[in-house]
Image (cartoon, rainbow, N blue to C red):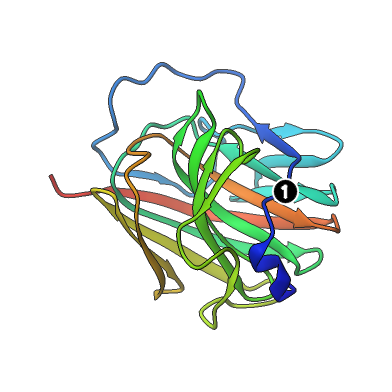
Amino acid sequence: MLMSKAVSTMSLKIIALLAFFIPLLIGCQAEPYQTTFDAKGTWGTGNEPDVTGNVQGGVYDMAVEAESGIFWATANQRLGYGTYRLEATQVDGPLDNGYGLMFLMDTQRNDFYLFEVSGDGFVWIGRCMERCNDDIVPLVEDGWFPSDAVKVGINQTNVLRVEARNGVMKFYVNDTLVGEAEDTVLTEGDIGVVVETYGAGGVQVHFDNFTFEPADS
């Protein structure tokens, strides 16, 4: 990944993989959430020319053929402040990419917080408003920044963790703190997994063991 990418905008083309139904959820879930992706559950899946997302082999398998874009799948949950944790492993494709988790997503407006790493050792932390089309706000550094905490290359598992308490968020990669931010624009919402491409397709990522522990009241 080129350092110049640190000041670039997010990709313009966006496809969301949504479930065929969205349950009516009232209030934030106060109980822990966990999925090992041994079953589809409420996660959205789909097969499109540019992207496929399926629960299979005990992981959420997302493959993106589009040369440029950000693609996600959501869990149809409503969660609030707490600790989010996800394991992500790139299994194919160029290393100039982004992959990770989204949280506190407003599914009506498609606003969300985004925490990504790249296959070549970079991190992006920020807030996307209206599907990342216009209002993109980096919350740590000015965009992508390098971090030795990221395990680079193919078949390397990166563990992403976010601790969010009353708008104060701490971001960890493989148990190493990589950034802190304070932002209260979004306080509850859905979760999801994300893959982003920059100039070349063929990126495939396996996601596993997505958990949430609510913050102490």
Name the outermost residue toward the bottom: 148
- The residue drawn where x is 81% and y is 63% is 93
Q: Secondary structure at mark 1?
A: loop
- The residue drawn where x is 76% and y is 49% is 63
Rendered view: 181 above or below 112: below
Residue 19 in the image, given as x and y percentages of width and height:
60, 25
Q: How many marks?
A: 1
- The residue drawn where x is 38% and y is 32% is 78
Q: Quadrant of residue 27?
A: top left
Q: Quadrant of the C terminus?
A: top left
- The residue drawn where x is 50% and y is 68% is 141
Residue 96 in the image, given as x and y percentages of width and height:
75, 67
Residue 100 in the image, given as x and y percentages of width and height:
57, 56
Q: Nearer the viewer, residue 171 or 186?
A: 186
Task: Tell me, yes or no, if residue 154 can be seen here.
Answer: no
Q: Nearer the viewer, residue 199 or 42?
A: 199
Q: Quadrant of the N terminus?
A: bottom right
Question: Is 149 placed left or right of 170 in the picture?
Answer: right
Q: Residues within 10 Å of mark 1 (few under 14, many from 20)?
A: some
Residue 37 in the image, given as x and y percentages of width and height:
54, 46
Residue matched to label 1: 11
Name the outermost residue toward the left: 217
- At label 1, the amino acid type is Ser
Q: Quadrant of residue 148?
A: bottom right
Question: Is 140 placed left or right of 13 in the picture?
Answer: left
Task: Tell me, yes or no, if residue 145 can be seen here.
Answer: yes
